Amino acid sequence: MWGIIPAAGSGTRIQPLAFSKELLPVGSRFDADTERPRAVSEYLVERMIRGGARKICFVIAPGKSDILEYYGGRVGLADIAYVVQPHPGGLCDAIFRALPLVHPTETVVVGLPDTIWFPEDGLCALDAERLSFLLFPVEHPEIFDAVVTDSKGIIHEIQVKHRSPGSHWVWGAFKVPGTVLHTLFELWCERNRIDEYIGSLINAYVSRGGEAYGVRAGEAYVDVGTLHGYRAAINLLAARSESQRLSFDVLPARLRDGKRTLILADDSGV
């Protein structure tokens, strides 16, 4: 299974930073017995590995070599690849930059590297045989992409940053068969690549008879791309740490890059 992480954005909402926003320290992890800051994108990498991804592709901008230097060529059980989005072109463009790596018979998971969400194994709730979105309840769906479904979970519409969304459930990640991802790319090209957001492309796909499903398995979702979101993420991790104080569910994976070994720990070390 491939994991695709679109990490080419400039992060204007939380600048100035001296590094890529995907490496913003949020919470902590343990390097042997030493507690160290944890990059926000590590949470998504951890969740993709828990969900079965064994190959992860970061889509980066030309100036984001620090992401490559940070992660290297392997994270725990997953090999890491990198492709470049030469110019800002939106989320669809970023995702499809990785398409040449994906065989139609493979499954793909896609997530956003500046978000933190629970449960950690949420991707396991998604069906590998169909296009399915992991949904989370939020208080302000108007700042996200709200997903309207029927009682069976079939998506009727994704409302991209709609002022009065018809649902308080928003998508945070999705799983898609390789064949469907290739079909979405063909549709995107047919539409002259006008779709910046994946939501508008999915709406076009659904209107033509395609099927997409929403799975309400998410518990908490935070976008760390703003200062408000950054503070909310710290509070969320602290709350999870407190509620799970007696648990010790450590991810059995390490970040290895040369002599560096980073342990992806649970959230008890915030």
Image: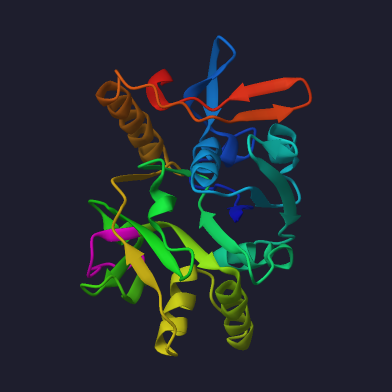
List the single residue furthest toward the top: 33
Q: Position of residue 224 (x, y in %)?
A: 43, 41
**Image check: 227 left or right of 16?**
left
Quarter of the image with the N terminus is bottom right
Residue 56 in the image, given as x and y percentages of width and height:
64, 49
Residue 232 lies, in percent from the top left, at: 33, 36
Q: Nearer the viewer, residue 164 or 26?
A: 26
Q: Point out the stretch of residues depicted in magenta.
A: 160-170
Picture layout, residue 188 above or below residue 111: below
Give the main secondary structure, helix, strand or loop, of the magenta stretch: loop
Is 162 on the left-hand or right-hand side of 191? left
Residue toward you, 64 or 244: 244
Give the side of residue 169 with respect to residue 263, left or right. Answer: left
**x then y, percent, for residue 29:** 51, 22
Question: Is 16 drawn above or below residue 108 in the view shown?
Answer: above
Membership of 263 in magenta stretch: no
Is residue 87 positioned above or below 112 on the image? Answer: below
Give the total number of marks visible in the rendering.
0
Which quarter of the rendered picture does the C terminus lie within?
A: top left
In this view, the residue in front, 127 or 65, is 127
Which residue does the image show at 58% across and 31% down from the upper left?
253
